[in-house]
């Protein structure tokens, strides 16, 4: 019984840690985007070389 309880507590702790890391990562991405701007906006449009090569 105690091994099952220990396994449950360990699994719940791992799940909480993964959730916390994911939330911090997403928040860091939002903060970085706010300071740098959107990454899509800084890219210049390029033609698709497979369809129509640029000269």
Image (cartoon, helix red, strand yellow):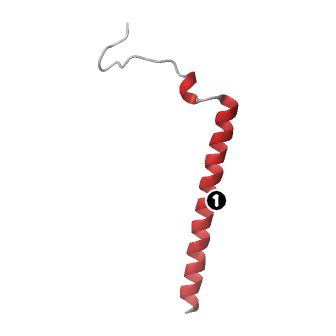
Q: Position of residue 28 (x, y in %)?
A: 66, 44
Describe residue 45's horizontal placement relative to residue 54 as left or right: right
Specify the quadrant of the image occupied by residue 21: bottom right
Under circle 1, the secondary element is helix
Q: Residue furthest left?
A: 51
Q: Where 5 falls versus 44 (above or below)?
A: below
Nearest to the observer: residue 54 or residue 22: 22
Q: Residue at x 67, y 37 (%)?
A: 32
Where is the C terminus found, in terms of image quarters?
top left
Q: Where 6 falls versus 33 (above or below)?
A: below
Q: Residue at x 62, y 71 (%)?
A: 13
Q: Residue at x 57, y 22 (%)?
A: 42
Q: Position of residue 26 (x, y in %)?
A: 61, 47
Q: Position of residue 12 (x, y in %)?
A: 58, 73
Specify the quadrant of the image occupied by residue 17: bottom right
Q: Residue at x 55, y 81 (%)?
A: 7
Q: Where 3 falls versus 17 (above or below)?
A: below
Q: Residue furthest bottom?
A: 1
Tally the marks. Answer: 1
Which residue, given by chain and number where applicable, does mark 1 sit on?
20
- Crowding around mark 1 (Cα neighbors within 10 Å: few <14, some 14 to 19, many 20+) is few
């Amino acid at each position: 019984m105690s091994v099952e309880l220990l396994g449950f507590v360990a699994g719940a702790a791992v799940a909480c840690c993964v959730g916390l890391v994911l939330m911090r990562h997403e928040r860091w991405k939002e903060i970085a985007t706010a300071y740098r701007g959107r990454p899509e906006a800084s890219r210049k449009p390029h033609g698709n070389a497979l369809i129509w090569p640029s000269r």
